[in-house]
Image (cartoon, rainbow, N blue to C red):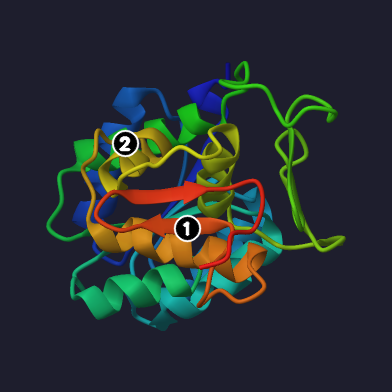
Amino acid sequence: MTSLSDIKIAIVDDEPSIVTMLQMVLRREGFHQLYAASTCAEALDVAKREAPDIVLLDIMLPDGSGLELISKLREYGNPHILFLTAKASDLDVLRGFAMGGDDYITKPFNPLEVAARILARIRRLEPEAPSTSPVKGTEPGVYRFGRFTLNEAEGELIVAGQPVPCPAQVFQLLLHFCKFPGIVFSKTQLYDKVWGINGQGDDSTVMVHIRRIRERIEIDPGNPKLLLTVRGLGYKLVKEPQER
C-alpha cells in the first residue's frame, strides 16, 4: 500500500490562511511532503524540484491563471489536479475540466472534504485484483475493445494502434467501464466508484469526463458507438460498436 508520507502535495494559493489550514488538515491525515506556492512562478519551481503527485490549484493567482498553468505543470509529471476556486459557475467548472483538471472544489470549502478526495484518489491508484476477468485471450489487466486497448499496469491507452495521452482521472473512469462491459452506471454510481466520495458530486464532473473519453476512443465523439448513453439511466461501454 502507498505510504501517505511518500505522497507529494503542492498547495498553490495566494491566501496564506487557506494554505495553513490545508497543511494542518493534511498533516493530521498523514501527509508530510507538503509544498506551498502563492504564484504561478513559484508553482513551477515546486514542480521542477519535486514533481508533486497532487496539486491543489487556485485559478486566480497574482501572476496568471491556474488554468493556463496546468500544461506547464504536466511537463514535470502527471499530477492529479484539484482546483480550489471561488469561480463556481457551470462554465467555469467545464472550462477547468476542459483545460485538464481532474477535480473541482469551490470556495468556501471544508478542508476535510479536500483531504477525503485526495485519499479517495490514492485508493483508486492502489493495485487490486481485477473485479472481472479481462477479455478472453489477453493478459491480465489488458482490456481490448475494438479500436482501443487499455493497459492497466502500464497506464496506457492505445487507439487505432497509436498511444493516446490520457489524464489520470479520465483513465480511471475508462478503466472502470472496461472492467464492467455492458453494465449501465448512473452518474451517481460513477462518482462514487471512480471518485470515491459517496456520490457527492455534480453532474458536470461525470459528463465532462465522459466527453473526454469519447474524444479519445470514438471515431465520431458526437455519435458514440462504444461508450453509450442510456437515456434516463446512465452510461455503458460495449465491446463491439453499435449502430444508433
- Amino acid beneath label 2: Asp
Disc 2 residue crowd, few under 14, some 14–19, many 20+, Cα 10 Å: some
Indicate the quadrant where residue 121 lies.
top left
Residue 228 marker? 1
Choose the circle earlier in sequence order: 2 or 1.
2
Task: Residue at 64% x, 58% y: name it.
Answer: 241
What x and y, as percent, mark residue 184? 40, 42
What x and y, as percent, mark residue 77? 67, 55
Label 2 sits on residue: 192
- Amino acid beneath label 1: Leu
Indicate the quadrant where residue 143 lies.
top right
Task: Residue at 57% x, 25% y: name it.
Answer: 126
Task: Residue at 28% x, 49% y: name it.
Answer: 233
Disc 1 residue crowd, few under 14, some 14–19, many 20+, Cα 10 Å: many
Looking at the rendered image, the disc whose residue lies closer to the viewer, 2 or 1, is 1
Q: Nearer the viewer, residue 37 or 145?
A: 145
Residue 53 vs residue 37: left or right? right
Q: CA distance from mark 2 to mark 1?
A: 20 Å
Q: Is residue 19 above or below residue 48?
A: above
For this orientation, the residue located farthest to the front is 243
For this orientation, the residue located farthest to the left is 108
Task: Residue at 45% x, 60% y: name it.
Answer: 209
Q: Is residue 50 above or below residue 12?
A: above
What x and y, as percent, mark residue 87? 21, 74
For this orientation, the residue located farthest to the bottom is 64
Looking at the rendered structure, the number of numbered marks drawn on it comes to: 2
